[in-house]
Image (cartoon, helix red, strand yellow):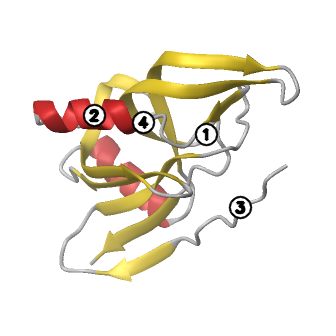
Amino acid sequence: MTTHRIPDLKIKASGENGLIEGYGAVFNNRDFVGDICLPGCFTDSLEQHKGAGTMPAMLFSHDQARPIGKWTDMYEDEYGLVVKGRLTLDVPAAKDAFHLAADDALALSIGFSTVQAHYDQNRQANLLEEVDLREVSMVSMAANSQAKITSVKTL
């Protein structure tokens, strides 16, 4: 079993309200539904979004009817999928999410379609080699317990 240190939550003072950062997914960590994201699994999807001038959606609890802002940057580092975005605080659900995130009461979770994966009998997990990333949500209970919000910027 691989153990990673989860980045600490940081509440920062800033002139810009509603900025949020975190890890939408963490690599090599078996989530509650039996998936393990492998390094590089988001690369092609992020490149397609970049080429199209789009980003995966920012939703509240995977609800397509509840967008709460927009992601402004996403990339992979050695730990997982880094996400940075801005909550639209005029939207009531976004304002709620902002306050809950600042109180460390929310996590992050991804919505995707599997492009390429295989089942690893030893790890009893579906190893995700490539996914089509559709959205990253702020949720109360994430499937990947290490997918955390690492920074909430407030006035």
Label 1: state its secondary structure: loop
Specify whether residue 59 is in view: no
Marks 2 and 4: in contact by CB < 8 Å?
A: no
Q: Nearer the viewer, mark 4 or mark 1?
A: 4
Mark 1 Cα within 10 Å, few/some/many (few <14, many 20+)?
A: many
Q: Nearer the viewer, mark 4 or mark 2?
A: 4
Mark number for residue 4? 3
Of callouts 4 and 1, the N-terminal one: 4
Specify whether residue 50 is in view: yes
Question: Residue beneath label 2, please?
Answer: 67
Marks 2 and 1: in contact by CB < 8 Å?
A: no
Image coords of residue 75 (percent x, y): 36, 51
* Real-space Cα separation, disc 3 to disc 2, in angstroms: 31 Å
Q: Nearer the viewer, mark 1 or mark 2?
A: 1
Question: Residue beneath label 4, please?
Answer: 42
Number of numbered discs on residues: 4
* Real-space Cα separation, disc 4 to disc 1, in angstroms: 18 Å
Image coords of residue 154 (percent x, y): 31, 74
Q: Residue at x 73, y 32 (%)?
A: 32
Mark 4 Cα within 10 Å, few/some/many (few <14, many 20+)?
A: many
Amino acid type assigned to the residue bearing label 2 in the image: Pro
Residue sitting at the far bottom = 13
Q: Is 14 left, or right, of 61 in this rendering? A: left
* Real-space Cα separation, disc 1 to disc 2, in angstroms: 17 Å
Q: Is 99 left, or right, of 51 in this rendering? A: right
Of callouts 4 and 3, the N-terminal one: 3
Question: Residue beneath label 1, please?
Answer: 142
Amino acid type assigned to the residue bearing label 3 in the image: His
* Real-space Cα separation, disc 4 to disc 2, in angstroms: 21 Å
